[in-house]
Image: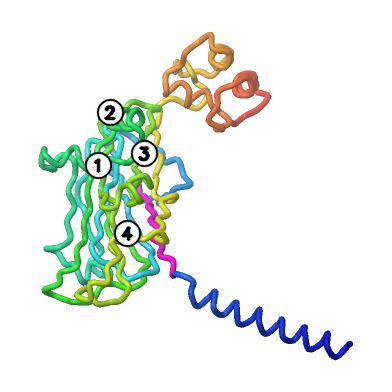
Amino acid sequence: MVIMKKILCIVLSVVMIVSCCFVFADAAPTYKATWTMTANVNGTSYNSNNTITVKPGDAVKVTLRLANNYYIGPTCLQIFYNSNMFTGSRNGEFNKNGKLYGVCGKTWSTYTDWNDAHPDNLNQGWPNYSADKLAEFKKNHHFLRVTMTPNVMMTSTTVGSINEELITITFDVSKSAQPGSTGQIILPVESRRDKNYKTGYFFCAIYKTEEINSKEMMVYADNQTFDCSKAVLNFQVASSAKLGDVNKDGKINSTDALLALQSSVGSKTLTAEQKTLADVNKDKVVNSVDALKILQYSVGIITKF
């Protein structure tokens, strides 16, 4: 009996191992593209975890990086920016040492800002938002388009797995941007291809092999994913007033504390700049905690926020 049990255990173990081999052998490969953006303002670098403070007239240099695990072919994407904060973009400098640029070159790598786009193209490429959300998005966003297409006359080889910067674009903060106003530069994940939008403007051609001419391009793949969670930059226009000086009279006193308290209970409406000045603990909410800190500062109980 003991011997039979041992034999049975061995047989079951062998069956499980063989079954696992078949499962893994049949497992479909997965393809992933990860997009990230970083910014440089007046010599300081920022990433998606920061709220970036800018001044009217600043130049913001934004760098786009792509990491993938497949053979990449034609690539097209659109980066959106708040038109109430940025007058537009300029100086789209491609990474000329990059592998993707190496098979695309100057002729086949293009960057076009909203201000230079043909009128017929201005209605194309918006995110796949619901109608009401898209209508609101269009009110205060413009976009620029980046395309990188391997030149098949130059090479028949696509680019394998890469993790490199593709392009650095300079955005100009409007000189009339209001203090306290906020904005974004963003690559919306909703712009990517999906089952209902297979040829969208967020496009990365996937090849099974490195040969472009092999016709092994995957027009759409269920196991293709995009990660754009780090492809968003948040900005806020700096105020000339000191933190806590809600009414901007040059003094921090009980009047400022009262304004913060009134705002917290809805009896006073503050401007975007005033909200920034009142949020002294920087938790993005103006409430009684901020009012108390402003009052404590005004009488010398605390010396900094």
Comparing 235 with 220, the one in front is 220
The residue drawn where x is 29% and y is 30% is 140
Q: Mark 3 and mark 2 in contact (Cβ < 8 Å)?
A: no
Mark whose residue sits in front, 3 or 1: 1
* Residue 191 forms part of the magenta stretch: no
The residue drawn where x is 49% and y is 71% is 27
| Relative side of 253 to 2, left or right | left
Q: CA distance from mark 2 to mark 3?
A: 14 Å
Q: CA distance from mark 3 to mark 1?
A: 11 Å
The amino acid marked with disc number 2 is Lys
Label 4: element kind: loop
**Type of secondary structure dominating the magenta stretch:** strand
Which portion, as a residue range, is magenta?
A: 29-41
Mark whose residue sits in front, 4 or 3: 4
The residue carrying mark 2 is: 139
The amino acid marked with disc number 3 is Gln
